[in-house]
Amino acid sequence: MSLLTPRASPWQWGNVPGPTMAMCPDNPPKVYATMIKRAKNPLLIVGSLVLEVQLGGKLLLDYAMEIAKRGNCTLIATAHTYKAFLERNFPAVPMTLVDIVNRLQDPNFTANPEKKPPHDLVLFLGIRYEFASQGLATLKHFAPHLRTMTLCKWYHPNASWSFPNVKDDEWQKLLDELIQALS
């Protein structure tokens, strides 16, 4: 049995990533959980969709908090999402996507000064596709010290690892299994 599924297609057909494309493991939740647990300082970046998307009556924000907590990830709240984390008394760092992508190009940067060493794994969740795609392309070319992983329902070819294109019900199942695997 192969560890990787056949190459997925970018969700937006105009996204031409080049010869290096994200891998889609056969069992993404188990593989992702293992990678997150092994990371020395994982970082979860969330965008505005965490406040807009509900999966089975549960906000994507709740999934983000659970993944960050169980995966021991520093959480970056982009766009206007920081207030929601404050209201839930969840530790998050407010920063724009462009700013965090620029800072991550520095191999010594850490978003949480209390956590050392620098970040080695960056997860994206709830960021609009076109913004995430550009951020991932920048990190792919200018931050070779990082591995990137997307937890979105769309395949992101510029990430190191990505879910394939899935419908909401399967996406919910993947996120639930990831949270279970992180326990």
Image (spheres, helix red, strand yellow):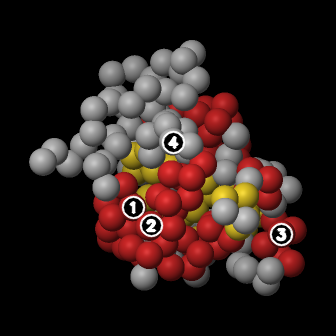
Dot 4 or dot 3: first in sequence order is 3
Image coordinates of residue 42 in percent, x first then y, are 48, 66
Q: Is residue 78 above or below residue 70?
A: above
Residue type highlighted by circle 4: Val
Q: Secondary structure at mark 3?
A: helix
Residue type highlighted by circle 2: Leu
Question: Marks 2 and 4, Cα distance to the nearest angstrom?
Answer: 15 Å
Image quarter (top left, top right, bottom left or bottom right) of the C terminus: bottom left
Dot 2 or dot 1: first in sequence order is 1
- Which sits in the foreground, 16 or 140? 16
Q: Is residue 139 left or right of residue 81?
A: left
Q: Is residue 4 above or below residue 173?
A: above
Number of residues whose C-alpha sits closer than 10 Å to that of mark 1, classed few (under 14), some (14–19) or many (20 or more): many
Q: Secondary structure at mark 1?
A: helix
- Residue topped by disc 3: 84
**Callout in the foreground (1, 4):** 4
Residue type highlighted by circle 3: Ala
Number of residues whose C-alpha sits closer than 10 Å to that of mark 2, classed few (under 14), some (14–19) or many (20 or more): many
Q: Is residue 134 left or right of residue 121?
A: right
Q: Which mark is residue 166?
A: 4
Q: Is residue 103 left or right of residue 176?
A: right
Dot 3 or dot 2: first in sequence order is 3
Q: Is residue 120 above or below residue 181?
A: above
Question: Residue sitting at 57 percent across and 79 percent down?
Answer: 69
Q: Secondary structure at mark 4?
A: loop
- Pointer 2 and pointer 1: residues touching (CB < 8 Å)? yes
Q: Secondary structure at mark 2?
A: helix
